[in-house]
Amino acid sequence: MGEYHLIYDNDALSVPPSVQSITVAKSVAVIKKAAFKDCIHLTEVLIHNGVQVIGDDAFHGCTSLASISTPPSVKVVGEGAFGHCMQLRTIVLNDGLEDIGSQAFIGCIALQHITIPSTVEFLPIAVFENSGLRSIDLGNGLVEMEEEAFRGAAELRTVTIPASCRYVGEAAFKGLLKLRQVTFEGSNVSIDDYAFSGCTSLRTLTMMTTTNDNNDDDDDDEDDNHDRNDEPFIGESAFENCTMLRDVSLGNCCVEIRDQAFERCSSLEKLNIPPGVLHIGDEAFAFATSLREVTLWAGLQSMGECVFFNCTSLEGIDFPWTMDKIPFRTFSGCVNLCSVTLCEGLLSIDDLAFEGCRVTRSSIAMPSTVTHISSIAFGY
């Protein structure tokens, strides 16, 4: 019936697919690319301390492998290394690991929890694609997670992103229908486009207030795909269609909330835009139909168009003195808006800014600094 146990060393040319257990020899520093790929009967692996690299696809398709522990000597887990290990329930990654390849755990449908060591700074594209993860511990050392890192991880319920993280990639958690809670332990982080779009069970978003610290990120690698010297932002459609999102705390470091960032968050009731936010993009909160209370702190300099379009529950708003314009259709369709306070420093009110609102031009005390009010600012 073939070999059941194998001592794997650097001279091994091939591994019979019937192998059931493997001991990696102490002389081995690198487990080669695809070394045990598609060994569908493999159930036990012993990796001695000394192995530094688990090569690309090394255990890919080992469908009977249920658990594995990597020693502290392992620095690299290659691309697809444990891909489609469909029975893999437990994997121990020790401190010392530095690099995890893309799709390393793709299709690990039995893997419900994993701890990423603090020595790992980067999670690559689709690293946990279509995995069974319900929770994950991300070490405080993680700096960046790439686009679609958790694509298709449909069972993921909660995620806490450490304060060390500076970037969450495009669509990293997009469309995860069971994700209920996201906590950022800091707020000095950029959340790229569509990162949490369509997470329809998401109820709580918390970004912790970050103390003033001089981060050592100014000398980050110049060849990174993303410029981490950019000011932190919430990207386009980052939380779009998170229809159960009720509780949002934005911390204090985000500088820009981009277009449609929270569009159609129809359960959102209260919103506090902290002083660090300088710009809010087009339609950022459009169709947030339960939004009743908005606080805009001094520091906000500009808005795009239609920011609060069709926020039908909004009743009142106070503008900070730092804003000089109310743009096109800012509050169009806010049918219950009846109280608006404007500050000295405001210069202009654009077309249809208050179309369909209960508030009228005569009910607003206009600052002396206003030099232009569109003739259709309050509707045709």
Image: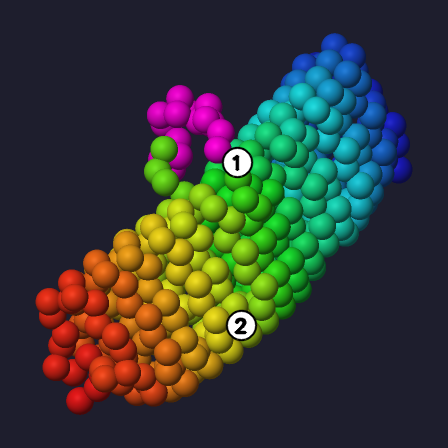
Circle 1 sits on which residue? Answer: 211
Residue 296 in picture, x, y percent from top left: 40, 60
Residue ID at (48%, 71%): 293
Residue 219 drawn in magenta: yes
C-alpha distance separating marks 1 and 2: 27 Å
Q: Which residues are magenta?
A: 212-228
Residue ID at (28%, 83%): 363
Q: Is 199 situated left or right of 170 in this image? A: right
- In the rendered picture of this protein, how many numbered marks are placed on residues? 2
Residue ID at (44%, 53%): 274
Q: Decide which of 142, 109 is in the foreground and name it.
A: 142
Residue 235 in picture, x, y percent from top left: 40, 54
Q: Please tell me whether mark 1 sits on a helix, a strand or a loop.
A: loop
**Most frequent secondary structure within the magenta stretch:** loop
Q: Is 102 situated left or right of 262 in this image? A: right
Residue 243 in picture, x, y percent from top left: 54, 72
Q: Please tell me whether mark 2 sits on a helix, a strand or a loop.
A: loop
Residue 163 in picture, x, y percent from top left: 57, 37
Amino acid on which the number 1 mark rests in the picture: Thr
Q: How is the image coloured?
A: rainbow
286 is higher (above) or lower (below) than 75: below
Pointer 1 local density, CA inside 10 Å: few below 14, some 14–19, many at least 20: few
Q: The C terminus appears in which quarter of the rendering?
A: bottom left
Amino acid on which the number 2 mark rests in the picture: Glu
Residue 109 in sight: no
Q: Circles 1 and 2: CB distance less than 8 Å?
A: no
- Residue 269 tag number: 2
3 is higher (above) or lower (below) than 350: above
Q: The N terminus appears in which quarter of the rendering?
A: top right
Label located before the other in sequence (1 or 2): 1
Residue 18 drawn in magenta: no
Q: Decide which of 87, 327 is in the foreground and name it.
A: 327
